Amino acid sequence: MENLLGLLRVRVKRGVNLAVRDVRSSDPYVVVKMYNQKLKTRVIKKDVNPEWNEDLTLSVIDPHHSVLLTVYDHDTFSKDDKMGDAEFEIFPYIEALKMNVTGLPNGTVIKRIQPSKENCLADESCIYYNSGKIIQDMILRLRHVECGEVEISLHWIDLPGSKGL
């Protein structure tokens, strides 16, 4: 607990134009990994544009550690098919949190991160202030697959008794 900075809530919002892995569709779910933590969303049946709107909460020890998000197609009688992955850094988000901004108008953008060859962003990612919280929205382009994106947002949870930022 003394090494813990806090909790990172990853809201997995939705998938867009995910790859077809069954006859006409897929049964996708998302796995989020960081350190030895592995969390997953529920399976959405027969949908290449699924809406999860599910929160997965990771313990953060090192802000320089990246998060790996992988989409799978659930199969009943065989190994689940991989439908692509994306990696994202939490360091820019942690840096924005450390600024300790308060009282800004809702929607104020604190930082913008541009898509590049070094990240999996499909579009500009904004870290913004909303209702006393700092949030980062991302659209991740999946790698190692023909198509697909996953929309997520990051929220920070301070944990009493943790090291904190």
Image: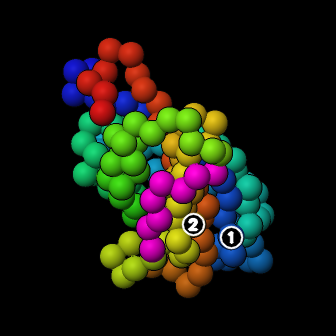
- Packing grade of label 2 (10 A; few <14, some 14-19, many >=20) is many
Residue indicated by mark 1: 16
State whether residue 121 is above or below residue 154.
below
Magenta span dominant secondary structure: strand
Q: Find the residue positioned furthest to the bottom.
A: 146
Camera-nearest residue between 109 and 78: 109
Q: Amino acid at mark 2?
A: Ile
Relative side of 36 to 79, left or right: left
Name the front one of labels 2 and 1. Answer: 2
Circle 2 SS class? strand
Q: Are marks 2 and 1 in contact (CB under 8 Å)?
A: yes
Q: Is residue 13 left or right of residue 82?
A: right
Location of the C terminus by quadrant is top left
Q: What span is colored magenta in the figure?
A: 107-114
CA–CA distance in space, label 2 to label 1 = 10 Å
The image quadrant of residue 47 is bottom right
Applied colour scheme: rainbow
Residue under numbered circle 2: 139
Q: Is 158 placed above or below 9 here?
A: above
The x, y position of residue 131, in whole percent, is 64, 36
- Please identify the quadrant where the N terminus is shown: top left
